[in-house]
Amino acid sequence: MLRSLATALVLSVLVAQCIESKSGNHVAMMIQSHFLQHGVRLPTRAFKEAVKNAAINVSHLSHRPSSLVILAMANEEALLRTVPIFLRSLRGVNVSSGTDAGKTFDGRLVMVAWSRDALVMCRELQAEYSHHCVRDAEHAAGKNSLGFHTDGFNALGFAKIKYILNGLSAGHDVMFLDADIIMLRDPLPYFYDHGADIYAMMEKCLLFNDTVSIAAFEYVRHQKLTPPLNIGALFFKATPGVTRCVYNWIWDMYGQVAFRPHVWDQDIFGVLMPKCSYKFDLRLQVLDPRLFQSACYPRCGCMYHDANVTSATLGMSAAGVPPVTGHLCDPGLWGSWLLRHFPCSGTTDQKAWHMRQFAEGLVHGQPVHITKHWAIEKKQGKGDLEGQEEVAEDDAGMSSAENVRL
């Protein structure tokens, strides 16, 4: 009886997908290749071999026999623009402890390329970096930047979750990083010291306690407000409950996409993951925004004191790191940061511009522009007059599109 009901549910979803595909739902058509009749496609032999070779031994941190793999994905535009900067940052950070201590993080990365040309570009970068390249022949989202809620933007969420699920199913803890990230220091001790099964970034700079599980009863029952989450950097422990919740994440999206082509992986994560984690007694926690920084945060990044986080202030906005002059940010204040993510920065080319600014600030120790919003304010005449000569150059890092992937 249960098997018949399950089969009927799968068939109803497939029929709905077929009907919607004929009516012009391109996302529903694009994501079909990630699924078979019995569920999400299984990993390829090349993927399993790559994650095996890239895995870091983290048994000393997790206090259980375990390994971790870093996953990322890219199309041709990202491989040309942001990925080289991303890889350069990973190359500059060593695993800090354990049997893999001293190895650079670029060698711990599996980069999934979405086309033959992208795979060639990924392998060409191996002349300088030690990452592993595999191709996902089932995903086709375009070669260029993917604007907010375009078909390619929404379709790539399915690919992302598939890679996470397949990494977990192979027995590895998974850290998934978007390719518009610069890593500054080894984040692994943080992941295993704070006791969570799943971590996600915060979308905004808010006063919050990163040891609190947002899968607790009071958050699931909406007695307390769950902070908005960002999935540019994610961590998952390879446990049965976590793997089941990741599967539910992609399956929930699959059930919705026929009727809601703008279904967004980040939205569904924020709604479903706390509830599923609660069911399996998992700890779902936010990454400290003072360590895991985002270009969506105001001014020069997120900053507040632990003493400011109280039951009365939890979830309130923090002012952020002030500029040193005009709209320039001081690299001297980045010493505690583990990584910086560059959403809210425009197209892939514009993200790369801000990433290069950030990287140059790290190398030379000189104040630089790392946030798009201020450049727009200056162009509109809302900022102060200091540094107006830089506005024309800043235009290279501006766009009206707030959310562009890759």
Image: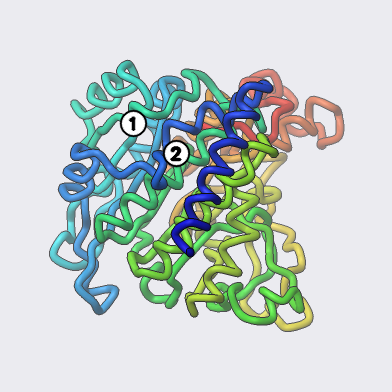
Quadrant in which residue 286 is drawn: bottom right
Nearer the observer, 96 or 255: 255
**Residue at 65% in and 35% down:** 403
* Contact flag, marks 2 and 1 (Cβ < 8 Å): yes
Could you give the CA–CA distance between mark 2 and mark 1, rounded to whole angstroms?
Answer: 9 Å
> What x and y, as percent, mark residue 203?
64, 53
> What x and y, as percent, mark residue 383?
82, 36
Callout 1: helix, strand or loop?
A: loop
Q: Residue furthest front?
A: 1
Q: Is residue 207 above or below residue 270?
A: below
In the picture, measured across the screen, residue 366 lies left or right of residue 176, that is right
> What x and y, as percent, mark residue 249?
52, 54
Residue identifier under label 1: 136
Question: What's the amino acid at mark 1?
Answer: Asp
**Residue at 32% in and 16% down:** 117
Q: Is residue 285 above or below residue 144?
A: below
Question: What's the amino acid at mark 2?
Answer: Ala
Question: Is residue 232 visible to us here?
Answer: yes
Q: Residue 337, which numbered label?
A: none
In the picture, measured across the screen, residue 42 lies left or right of residue 353, that is left
Nearer the observer, 393 or 263: 263
In the picture, measured across the screen, residue 97 lies left or right of residue 20, that is left
Callout 2: helix, strand or loop?
A: helix
Q: Earlier in the sequence, mark 2 or mark 1?
A: 1
